[in-house]
Amino acid sequence: MTRLPHHQHTHSLADRADVGARLREHRKRQGLTLKQLSEQCGVALSTLSKMELGQATVSYDKLAAAARALKIDLSRLFSPEDHHFCPEQPTVVTNRIDELTGYGTGSYEYHMMAGDFPGRSMTPLYARIIARELSEFDDFVRHPGQEFTMVLSGRIRIQFENGEHISLGERETAYFNSEIGHVYLTEGDSEAEVIAVMSDRRMAEEKPAT
């Protein structure tokens, strides 16, 4: 396995104002008010408003919940609309991690992969784990389905809201119920890198909006 040296990180991050503008565009395209979207996705109205205005950086679960309610792939919030145009179902799509636009929360930096594959039932991403203490989070992250993660470099601690935790090093993996609140923390002297895959059975049953 080839490790990417930390000093070579050149990953681009999406501007939160652009993410918010795309969220607002998809909401209005579907004729929903902020209140209606809030009721459907479970994210507070005030938080959604700040997200659309680019006034807040939020955790993965809130962005994913909004995208799920709009029946769009989460990756569509991070890239221009024409980037996702696919005239027919492909056999395979590929990505280079260092060419993917990511989203930084302060605690994590994550980059969606395979966003060009329509109707996908898994959400794979590459993430840099920056947070070291549980106090750096407002709350645990929760989202429907299950989650698999593999450590590429460094060492991480996954802390669950029920008090359980696990510590993983390079090439070690974990698979868990992502509806149980959880956060990733880096251990040691450097940030950690992981590949995570989220699976939501409902995604496979719902046709994404075009």
Image: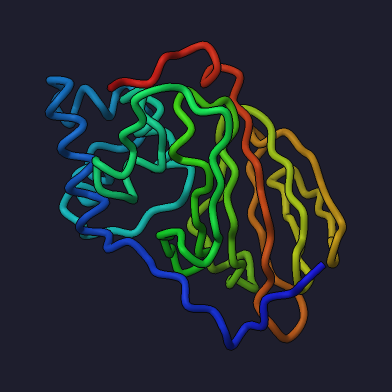
> Is residue 97 left or right of 153 when viewed as pictured?
left
Reply above or below: 168 against 148.
below
Residue at 40% x, 69% y: name it: 12
Reply above or below: 157 against 112.
below
Q: Quadrant of residue 82?
A: top left
Q: Quadrant of residue 207?
A: top left
| Quadrant of image for the C terminus | top left
Residue at 41% x, 27% y: name it: 68
Residue at 48% x, 33% y: name it: 117
- Along the viewing direction, whichever of 140 and 204 lies nearer the viewer: 204
Q: How many marks?
A: 0
- Along the viewing direction, whichever of 152 and 190 lies nearer the viewer: 152
Residue 53 lies, in percent from the top left, at 16, 53
Q: Quadrant of residue 133?
A: bottom right
Residue at 12% x, 29% y: name it: 28
User: Which coloring applies here?
Assistant: rainbow
Residue 153 lies, in percent from the top left, at 75, 71
Residue 124 lies, in percent from the top left, at 59, 43
| Quadrant of image for the N terminus | bottom right
> Is residue 163 left or right of 84 when viewed as pictured?
right
